[in-house]
Image (cartoon, rainbow, N blue to C red):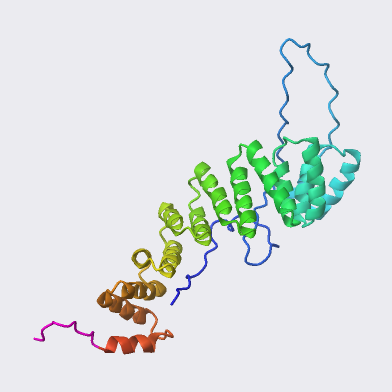
Amino acid sequence: MALARDIALTIGRAKKSLNSHAQPGVRLLALALLLGLSRAPLLAQAPEGAPPPAAAAPAPRADLGPARELVRGQKYPEAETLLADLQTAYPDDPSLLLLRGEVLLAIRNPQKAAEVLGHAAEVAPRKLRVHFGLGSALSEIGDTSGALAAFATEIELNPDPEIRAKARVNRSVLYEREKKWSESAAELEALLAENPEHQEIYGDLAQLYLKADRPEDALKAVERGADKGPAAARLYVNIGADYYNKKSFEQAANCFGKALEIDPGLAQAELNLARALDHLDRKTEADSHLKRYLELRPDAPEAAEIKKRLAVPPTKKSGTKTK
């Protein structure tokens, strides 16, 4: 009989600053409205020995102070009205375009946000956060390949570890939606290489490796994570179920045992361990775990069958003497 995995975990990536209108059951994309920040674009150096270029008149820039005040007060519709008016006078101001794009995302207008942020990427292709916002907008309108490329560009340009981490998470989510489990896991591995303190990510990483049919990597991910609480115990149950269903009963038993070391009250681990031990011909040990399972879940659907088994004395092997 195949074992079902325990509770499917969705930990780590869906904890912080997430928009709330994605499809149910799908981890959401992190949307960073880091408003009010501005970085100057990188300037190309003139060739050596060339005469200094004539000073160009600075491009006119909009006064974004009032719009930023509205954003700080979370008055996003009012900010959008003001920014839309400003854009008619300053159509190529990259800071204005970035701020408006982020506001459009906040008011859930990703189609217009993609248009505005796409223009920002054209006029200021190295401006930080533009490609992150563009990736968020494109993902919302279903342009997965465009979103993946935009987040990749943000990672290439932006040294900010928080933004890089969120871009990695978003790429992982997009790959997961496409059922590209290994590619999704690779993004989390890259995140952890840069930010090993993100311990909550290991649970998601283990789940992705399980979906990719890579239980050994899933096991390594759980063991690398520092959190050894109930979440890790359930992950061990899930990995053990994968091993069990592949008839790797020794590895399955080890995983269920580790789950019980972390959480001795995890009934599903007791039952699964008993089943694995049965296949290893360790009936006495299996019976002890079945007894413990009944203590934890006396009304379990399997209770009658287990009680009947435990009431029958074990069969003596041929050649054993009776005292």
At 38% from the left edge and 76% from the top edge, which residue is drawn? 271
Q: Is residue 291 left or right of residue 318?
A: right
Q: Is residue 315 magenta?
A: yes
Task: Tell me: residue 186, above or below residue 274.
Answer: above
Q: Is residue 170 left or right of residue 298?
A: right
**Could you tell me residue 231's position as x and y percent?**
46, 63
**Could you tell me residue 189's position as x and y percent?**
52, 48
Q: Relative to the observer, which residue lies in front, 312 or 56?
A: 312
At 40% from the left edge and 59% from the top edge, which residue is drawn? 228
Q: Relative to the observer, which residue lies in front, 123 or 218?
A: 218
Residue located farthest toward the left when viewing the structure as drawn: 323
At 39% from the left edge and 73% from the top edge, which residue is drawn? 272
Q: Is residue 74 visible?
A: no
Name the quarter where the C terminus is drawn: bottom left
Task: Tell me: residue 127, above or below residue 9.
Answer: above
Q: Which residues are magenta?
A: 313-323
**Could you tell me residue 49's position as x and y percent?**
73, 10
Count of marks, rendered view: 0
Task: Tell me: residue 1, above or below residue 148.
Answer: below
| Quarter of the rendering containing residue 48 | top right
Q: Relative to the observer, which residue lies in front, 192 or 20?
A: 192
| Quarter of the rendering containing residue 51 | top right
| Quarter of the rendering containing residue 50 | top right
Residue located farthest toward the front when viewing the structure as drawn: 318
**Could you tell me residue 115's position as x and y percent?**
82, 48
